[in-house]
Amino acid sequence: MRFPFGTIPKRQAVDAGTDSVAVEGEAVAYALRRSRRRTLGIAVHPDGSVVVRAPLRVSKARIREFVAGKIPWIEKARRYFSRRPPKAAPPGYASGEVHRFLGQEYRLVVSRGRADRVELLLGCLCVTTKADPSEGRIRALVEGWYREQADVVFLDRLAVCHRLLAGEAIPFPALRIRKMTSRWGSCSSAGRINLNLWLVKAPVACLDYVVVHELCHFKVRSHGPKFWQLVARYMPDYAERRKTLNADGGRE
Ligand SMILES: [Zn+2]
């Protein structure tokens, strides 16, 4: 990148390539941007990538030292982005509202009938209710249906992902599904995986990412480079899946 008169405009940053710093044998890669600023700055993007902003004449060694000191903070930021469902207004429960199931959109069709029933029909999520179709009632029926689907789909994907990681010899975990507001999944030292019910709205590729992520925690607990290397070994496109998940998947 060239600038007139060989100088860099005050606010403009120059792409100075990428670099990485290794701490205890684990590497953190980052993009480096230089500009006429006075201090070092660092940012973690929602996809987990790291960008370091530096003054023009600070040495790469000094920058590496700076990044090395920020590793706990980088891990915290990555954890924040990987687990935080976006806050979006949940759909309503009147006919015509759009609801999601495994990444697909379905229009809600509410009708009265002789029995309570929820089913997918011709691109619609059809809810039949024998009682007054109040919003609370339709919500309860739809949520019950999501739970039934999640019970089947999540266990199926857990089996698929567990087979994918067969080489890691992880004991098959117990599965618990519940509504969570601040994370997509978690795991316990007792060998259980907890998945957020609302993952049932996300594409299967995103659900698989969360399952693989939690399975990998049985081998590596923290979100250090070793952890992400393990995830990448079995799911090379995990960052893309995580991005999709946090952008538009799975919300209530
Ligand atoms: Zn994690």
Image (spheres, rainbow, N blue to C red):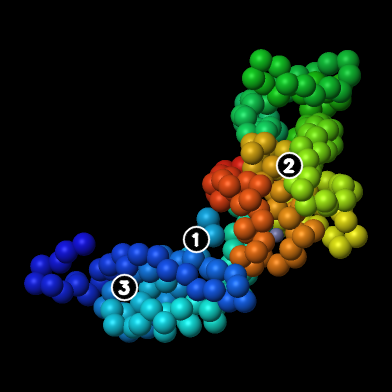
- The amino acid type found where label 1 is placed reads Ser
Residue 87, x across and y down, in percent: 61, 52
Could you classify mark 1 by the number of other residues whose Cα lies within 10 Å: few (under 14), some (14-19), or many (20 or more)?
A: some
Could you classify mark 2 by the number of other residues whose Cα lies within 10 Å: few (under 14), some (14-19), or many (20 or more)?
A: few
Q: Find numbered disc 2 in the image and state the secondary structure of the residue it sits on.
A: helix
- The amino acid type found where label 2 is placed reads Leu
Q: How many numbered discs, if any?
A: 3
**Mark 1 and mark 3 in contact (Cβ < 8 Å)?**
no
Residue lying farthest to the left in this orientation: 5
Residue at which label 2 appears: 164
Looking at the image, residue 55 sits to the left or right of residue 125; the answer is: left
If you read the primary sequence from the N terminus, does the residue marked by circle 3 or circle 1 appear first? 3
**Image quarter of the C terminus:** top right
Residue at which label 1 appears: 49
Q: Is residue 47 above or below residue 39?
A: above
If you read the primary sequence from the N terminus, does the residue marked by circle 1 or circle 2 appear first? 1
Task: State the CA–CA distance, disc 1 to disc 2.
Answer: 26 Å
